[in-house]
Image (cartoon, rainbow, N blue to C red):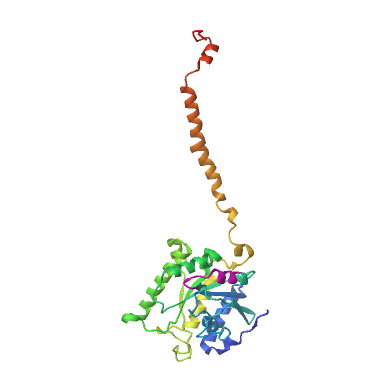
Amino acid sequence: MAPIEWAGIQQFPPATQHTLHELLGQLKEKDVGTLTILVMGKGGVGKSSTVNSILGERVATVSAFQSEARNPVMFSRSRLGFTLNVIDTPGIVEGGYVNEQALEIIKRFLLGKTIDVLLYVDRLDAYRVDNLDRQVIRAITDTFGKGIWQRGSVVLTHAQLSPPDGLNYDDFVAKRSEALLKYVRLGSGIRKQEFQEHSIPVVLVENSGRCKTNDGGEKILPNGTVWISNLMQIITEVVLNGGKSITVDQKLIDGPNPNNRGKFYIPLIIAFQYFFVVKRIQRAIRSDIASESSPLWELRDMGLADGKF
C-alpha cells in the first residue's frame, strides 16, 4: 500500500513542525529516504498512544478496555519525498510470560521489511524491574539478534508525574532508566564494555492530554523538555549513528538451524578424543605388549625352551 500524505505533521505547533522538517532534511542529506520505526514492549505501556503522538494523528486505536493492538499494523506517511513507516505491535506478555505466539505473528508480519529503529516502550511510573523484563528483552534479542539494540531506544511513557518520596524529577528518571537499561544489557547478552561504548538512549513521553505545554503550545515534560521534538531528534541520531538496519528475511524468522548447532565444536571434539583418549589407549597397549612375558610356544619356536613339550 502506498503511503498517504503526512497531514498530521501540520497538527503540531509551528516550532515542532520546524524541528521535524529540519530532522527530515538531515535524513535526506544522508540519503535516508525511508524510515521504518518498530514499536515493541509489554501490553498497556502506551505503544499505540506513542504511535499516534509521533504521527500527530489518531491512527491506532487506544482503549481503556483493550490493551493496544492485537495484530501488528504499519502506518505509512510521506512528506516532501520522505516516507515514514511506524509499526504498532501487540504486547508480547500474557499471563506473566512472554507470548511466543504474539512474537511469531510479529515476525511473520515483518517478513521482507527493514527495521531502522526499535522503540522499546515501558512506563516511567512502573517502579519495579524484574525477571519478566529480562525475558522480554531476551525474546526480542533472540528474534532479531543483538544488532537490533544498536538501532534501539528505550521510551518511557507516563512521564508527567511527581516522583515518590520527594525525589528530584531528573534523579528519579536517571534511577529508573539505569535500572531498566541494566536489564536490557542482561537480557540482550551484550557485554558491559560494549554496552557502555554504544549506549542506548532513553526518551521520555507523555501521550495524555494533560501534558503541559510551553508558550509555543509544544508539549513539555516537568523538566521543560519538548518531548515530541526530543523523541524525533533521538530517532534521527539513532539512524545516523547506529549500526545496520535489520532486514527481516525467512532465515531470521526461522531462526538458527538446530542441525547446525555445535558443528563448530566437532573438529575440537575429534582432536580431543584423538590426543587424550585414542593416544592414551595406544600407549597402554604398547606398554602391555612390552611388559607381557613370552608364552612357552613362542620360546620353543625361538629355541629357548628346555624342550619339555
Residue reaching furthest front? 309
Q: Which residues are magenta?
A: 94-107
Residue 169, image x, y percentages:
37, 80
Q: Quadrant of residue 8?
A: bottom right
- Using the image, determine if residue 302 lies above or below residue 220: above
Residue 203, image x, y percentages:
46, 77
Horizontal side of residue 22 vs 167, given as left or right: right
Horizontal side of residue 274 vs 160, given as left or right: right
Horizontal side of residue 134 vs 249, given as left or right: left
What residue lies at 63% left-to-right and 69% top-to-bottom?
A: 111
What residue lies at 51% left-to-right and 40% top-to-bottom?
A: 273
Q: Is 80 or 269 nearer to us in this picture?
A: 269
Q: Quadrant of residue 253?
A: bottom right
Q: Is 179 or 67 nearer to us in this picture?
A: 67
Residue reaching furthest left? 165
- Using the image, determine if residue 186 lies above or below residue 231: above
- Using the image, determine if residue 128 lies above or below residue 249: below
Residue 229, image x, y percentages:
50, 82
Q: Is 63 or 109 nearer to us in this picture?
A: 63
Magenta residue check for 109 = no
Magenta residue check for 100 = yes
